[in-house]
Image (spheres, helix red, strand yellow):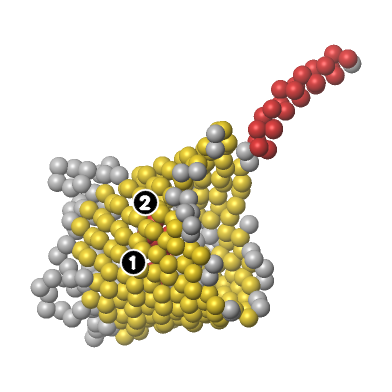
Amino acid sequence: MNKKLIALAVAGACVAPAAMAQTANPVTLYGRVHATFEVVEATGGASGTAELVRRNRVSDQASLLGVRGTEDLGGGLKAFFQLETAFKPDENNTTFAARNSGVGLQGGWGSLLLGRWDTPFKVVTGAIDPFGDVTLGGLSAAMQGRGLVGATAGNQFDRRDQNVVQYWSPSWAGIAVRASYSVNEGRTATANPQRWSGSITYTAGPIYVGFSADEMKDNPYTGTALLKKQEGSALFGNFTFGPVKVGALYEEFKRTGYGKQKAMMGNVVFTAGNNQLIYQYQQSKDGQLSGSALAQPKCDVHSLGYQYNFSRRTFFLGQYTKVENNQEAGCGFGGNDITIAKGQDPKGISLGMRHIF
């Protein structure tokens, strides 16, 4: 009996340091579940274009599951990691760990990571969107380079890049800097695809303002020189006074062989207790292929939302979004987009809930 007690005591002494290490350097499990019921359709377009008939759908709005942690290395230095994966509560077809994931060091000088992460351009401009860069009315409906049809279609400035080196500064009297480099692993004899992105922001009480710039070479998402160079810049800010929060975002995009594209967004959020009324307007225009006889693309997006906050972790959101494209534009929904022909006008109603843990 005494031998058994001694053995248990020895085992406990061996296990205790590991348990204490985990307590001192905790690993956190976190996540978000966000789903919506939607009624969507698209009408209009060129003569003979088939309309997208009205249909119902259940859509995921960037639900996620993640694990993150730190280790104190002493001298004010810490190691940190994060692994984050998407999952769809409505389907089962996601790729494991496709969201922000990386490993790095942090100290009084800031944080440096290697991995896969949202670009600074995406992070700071997305902070202006009261819909969180998801749902039908999210900012990528017309912003982030959206609006053109053809070689430049899509939201190439609303990216989570792979093979990234990224730096985040601490806050210096409200000023913070982010910078990232997406490396040229896909370099060939004829193409050198890579990307740089950076931002500077100022936060003080009810004020948040900033500037961001982004540059891509040789279209890093295809590995070919489809577009030799793309540049984006953004000015943004929001201000809260009493129950009202107002936000604004202005962007410009330059692409080799294309004219300058301009986009703007404005929104207002009125809060009364647990209730919030939200209106957001987006517009994208110009950017046609240089020398083209076609008209300049132009689109307008109107979104009206009502949000009820049950708690800091759970809310209900009802939303109506209408997109108006001219004959050359191809703007769509901010989240869970639909395939349309240029000139068609999507619209939809969304009802959903989000819970974070």
Which corner quadrant holds the N terminus? top right
At which x and y percent is residue 246?
48, 77
At 41% across and 42% down in the image, what residue appears?
114
At which x and y percent is residue 25?
62, 38
Describe residue 337's horizontal placement relative to residue 312 as left or right: left
Cα gap from disc 2 to disc 1, whole angstroms: 15 Å
Which corner quadrant holds the C terminus? bottom right
Q: In the rendered image of this protein, does residue 219 appear above or below residue 273?
A: above
Frontmost residue, 241 versus 162: 241
Work out whether residue 293 can be spotted.
yes
Helix, strand or loop at label 2? It is strand
Give the amino acid type for the residue marked by disc 1 in the picture.
Ala
At 77% across and 19% down in the image, what residue appears?
10
Q: Earlier in the sequence, mark 2 or mark 1?
A: 2
Q: Report the residue marked by disc 1.
A: 234
At 41% across and 75% down in the image, what residue appears?
248
Q: Which mark is residue 191?
A: none
Q: Which mark is residue 179?
A: 2
Work out whether residue 134 can be spotted.
no
Helix, strand or loop at label 1? It is strand
Q: How many labels, in total?
A: 2
